[in-house]
Image (cartoon, rainbow, N blue to C red):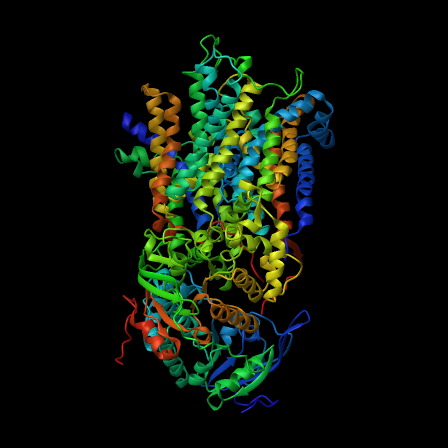
Amino acid sequence: MTFFEAVLLTIITASTPLVIAAIGELVTERSGVLNLGVEGMVIIGSVSAFVAAQMSGSAYVGLLAGVGGGAIFSLLFSFLTLTLVANQVATGLALTIIGLGASGMIGEAYVGVPGVRLLPLEIPVLSDIPYIGNILFKQDIIFYLSIVLVVAVNWYLFHTRSGLKMRAIGDSHSSAHALGINVIRTRYLAIMFGGACAGLAGAQLSLIYTPQWTENMSGGRGWIALALVVFASWRPWRILAGGYLFGAVTILQLHAQAFGIGIPAQFLSMLPYAATVVVLIIISHNRRATLVNTPASLGKTFVPDR
Amino acid sequence: MSSSDEPHADALLSIRKLTKLFGSFAACNEINLDIQPGEIHALLGENGAGKSTLVKMLFGVLEPTTGQIIWEGNPVSISSPRSARHLGVGMVFQHFSLFEALTVAENIALSLDDRIPIAKIAEETVALSQAYGLPLDPHAQVADLSVGERQRIEIVRVLLQNPKLIILDEPTSVLTPQEADRLFETLFKLRAEGRSVLYISHRLEEVQRICDRATVLRHGKVTGACEPRQETTGSLARMMVGSDVASIRHDDRREKGKIQLEIAGLSAPARTPFAISLKDVSLRVRTGEILAIAGVAGNGQGELFDVISGEFPVPVDDLIDICGEMIGTQGINARRLLGAGFVPEERHGHAAVTGMSLSDNLVLARSQSDAKAFLGGGFLNIIRRGVVKQAAKRISAEMDVRKSGEDPNAGSLSGGNLQKFIVGRELDRQPTVLVVNQPTWGVDAGAASRIRQAIVDLARNGSAVLVISQDLDEIFEVATDIAVISDGRLSAAYPAREMTREKIGLLMGGTHGTTTEAEPAHAH
Amino acid sequence: MRIELEKRRNVSKLFGFVSPLLALLLTLSAGAIMFLFLGKAPLDSLYALLVEPLFDPWSLNELARKAGPLILIAVGLSVCYRSNNWNIGAEGQYSVGAIFGSIIPVYFYGWSSPMVLPLMLLMGAIGGGLFAAIPALLKTHFNTNEILTSLMLTYMAQLLLDWITRGPWRNPDGHGFYGTRDFTPDQTLPPIWDDAISAHWGFIFAVIAAILIWFMMRYTLKGFEVVVLGHSERAGRFAGFSPKKMVWFAFILSGALAGLAGISEVSGSVGHLQPDISPGYGFTAIIVAYLGRLNPLGIIASGLVLALTYIGGEAAQLSIGVSEKVTRVFQGFLLFFVLSCDTLITYQIRIVWSRVRRKAGATA
């Protein structure tokens, strides 16, 4: 394997959790809900996956636990914002704080313990293609899932009646309600999907990226995923592009650190966050595009009149 | 033909003693109504008369407390919009439930059966819309369409379900006279096919023009059932309102007063993607004059108001002149200090904050103009709450504002009462210039009458008033001069007595720039 | 079974008071359940966490010490949130304030004068204010979401602090220890009482700031402006207020207060600048702000409550052997329940048991 191939592989590994968390949040936001608790759901996914893998000895069990953990944790968010109509921003923050705290507590006993690694799955035939085969088709299942998710979400949103209804809710929940669409139920499901994706992303972190548990290992990826959704103008394929852009920045700055470039490590570590800010500026600056692309009911409270 | 107690044998729809109670309040009280097949039937009444409640019961949104609904000879119970549609009842609401980010076909698909593919819906939409003279492009995004075009979507959506009865709630309130004519042609076509229309309106001339029969409601009861063409507008109005509405007392003094508000050749770009740009707007209002600007919603009224009020100043001073001062670049409080008062269109979240008390809302508009009275403590600007409360109390008494408690939240007042307070808030200052956008939209008849009289009185006492309104009846009641706004362009102003509805309609249509309307297939 | 919400005609003042108390009660219950799961006696654990620290003079001073930065930051955040500006980057503004405030001790170590400390505090406030001005600028000029930008900047500020204390500002005689030289007495924020365990003046600053801001919000036109713009930008413009200017005001004010908290902690508690100067004050302050119902006087109380969870958490680790991370979880629960109970202020909750769907409401 050449150096170049190795770098590409690490970029894929770094980008995958971002893509997954972001595509989940995209669905949530398309239904009109702003979930700032993604970071909390990611880290809950990480700790659930790690602990389950340790206790069962199987990484796949860990994977399921990560997905489940994220989904169940998201129910807290749903209950507060959909049923009790609490402020979405504050609730998301509450969940992030709980998530970071609880995961720290649960995972405390597991710090330093070697993890159960999720092994790659080779796809027969395709993995024999020179160059591409090594990079794309000898990956772990979570990578394949990330691609499947992007394709599936795109198809769902733009080619199914159910996806159309979801987009309608995101545009105007009151009009959707007037048409008899069940706004609350759709949003519960959308948030759960987002939570499950966040959990899956978290599982990737503790089962593949660094098969280990460290406190706060999500490192702000949940927040970056939120920025990615804005960057992608709420379109699934652009999530893929954006996720890989960020993954590349992350990996390149790590390599630059290892390389011993004159710039101090901390400044290089700032790059993904700085890049997020720059990307947000560029996308948001065009007010017309922002207005046209953003789901109009995003973040607004909805109380169904009966 | 008055309705007897026995339901008509061949009626499409008969309602007998239909009542809807909310607690002890009767929104609809023993209503009788008959609609024949192939009939355009008007439902007349002021705001709050019970028209909406009645119609919601017919469409399955509300459940009647007592009474019978008889459809094609059989008593029915309409429990949901879906069952109403199954019976053959379709409804076009006054406020559309459309999704701006989606296409026309997608919008229609959302209200139809899930199993029909969108491509087919698109096809049928084109066919139907052409057939009824309401052309639509199924792949256009709703956000790009005008209000009139959006109404077509709502109508086509209803027609696709092959209804026998179509209910229209105040459909012409958002249309130009030309678009209204086109709608009427569509209604005649429907009638010729044997379908019936229940036409809700408070516009008497329209009703006389197109409706075969009318039922008049007041305070939830039927006060009359008649053939509109055999009545005069006066007799219809009496049935609606109960007594002769005091017509506004005008002064005929026509000496030329001083110019208090002048705008000269103002152009302003659209601030947001869906806003209208103002194009070379000029107007002039003198003391004692009430200049009314007529126009259908969405033609730049809000944008015009914004530059006049100063919430969004313009780059050049001399474009706007208030009381002799060129203040185009200055903000709203500078204009207030010169003696101007402003009443925006939107009560909730613009003219007033619903979550704050009335006295707080008084400070909202008058913190600078009344700084001496309302603020103290030097640079700290401490609000003298006692003084403010007194002033709010005085204004409420003066304008007969009905409210619960001494100083309740603005949100707890009814639309009419809040509007009275908002207008009174400005009148209390005896402004030299008053600019009002939609003074009585959504306001009950009593409050509306009071507000209009207050405006007329203000002008009579020497102020200059600019009224922007979508209500032609209101305009003819109060205005001394009338201009028309269309697509951000303002026509010249004409004395009110020289203006007619036809002329206004022409000005609304004629100065329209580029439209996205496709012409109907048949030639005129 | 269904939960239905009905909007109250007038916001319930009763629940305005009851809600935070109810939230506290629920948090205690949730905490008790959590302790059960961890295999610890619930009531004993709660006692160790929340009551025991109150009986110890050392703890009471620690309470004031921890509450100081929480209250100072939260008071600034309350103005932000009430004006609908979501500053989530207080932690970063705290750090940058600490850095700015430490410029004098690092570069003018020998300078002795009564001016030194006030200057340090001023620079701390300026540093925090400047750093907060970045998300403000991005919001007003580039329409960028301030939540994400202020948060990203927080991560960057941490890295900046890390670099500066391990790199250029590192004490040359530090013996492998990361941080600047210890501050001289002139550069140190003095204790309130003449006592070894006394809390420093940071707490006093916090209380003063709370009172001043409370006064501003309740009585002055500026406070009125904050509330109006928080409700509606359009109404604010109608009143002649500028939404953009409010963004600057809110962010710079909260950033300055956070920066002041930062330098106060560093010069009063830690004694020098080092990579780790905050147990997450900037984030916990968000909870303090909400628990105090965004009212500066309420924030004094809620700041003390949350300070208690910090101290209790440390104590609980020793006395009942539970991880000190339990503090974080408690704080998160508290915010969660505060938000839940707040619903009761604006809405009446009705639990509907029957399966019959009620038809649409009372509006004609």
Q: Please tell me how many numbered marks the rendered image carries.
A: 0
The x and y percentages for residue A135 are: 31, 33
Instruction: Classify C95 as above or below A132.
Output: above
Task: Check the picture and name the quadrant holding the N terminus of chain A.
Answer: top left
Q: Is residue A211 visible?
A: no
Residue at (48% x, 22% y) in the render = C101
Instruction: Classify C307 as above or below A226.
Output: above
Res B488 quadrant in image? bottom left
The x and y percentages for residue B161 are: 43, 73
Query: Horizontally, is B502 left or right of B430 in the view?
Result: left
Instruction: Classify B222 as above or below A165.
Output: below
Query: Horizontally, is A171 left or right of C317 in the view?
Result: left
Task: Check the picture and name the quadrant holding the C terminus of chain A.
Answer: bottom right
The x and y percentages for residue A191 are: 50, 47
Question: Toward the viewer: B133 or C146?
Answer: C146
The x and y percentages for residue B146 are: 36, 65
Res A104 quadrant in image? top right
Question: Toward the viewer: A141 or B287?
Answer: B287
Q: Is residue B483 visible?
A: yes
Res B210 quadrant in image? bottom left
Residue at (54% x, 64% y) in the render = B419
Query: Horizontally, is C298 left or right of C119 in the view?
Result: right
Question: Toward the viewer: C357 or B40?
Answer: B40
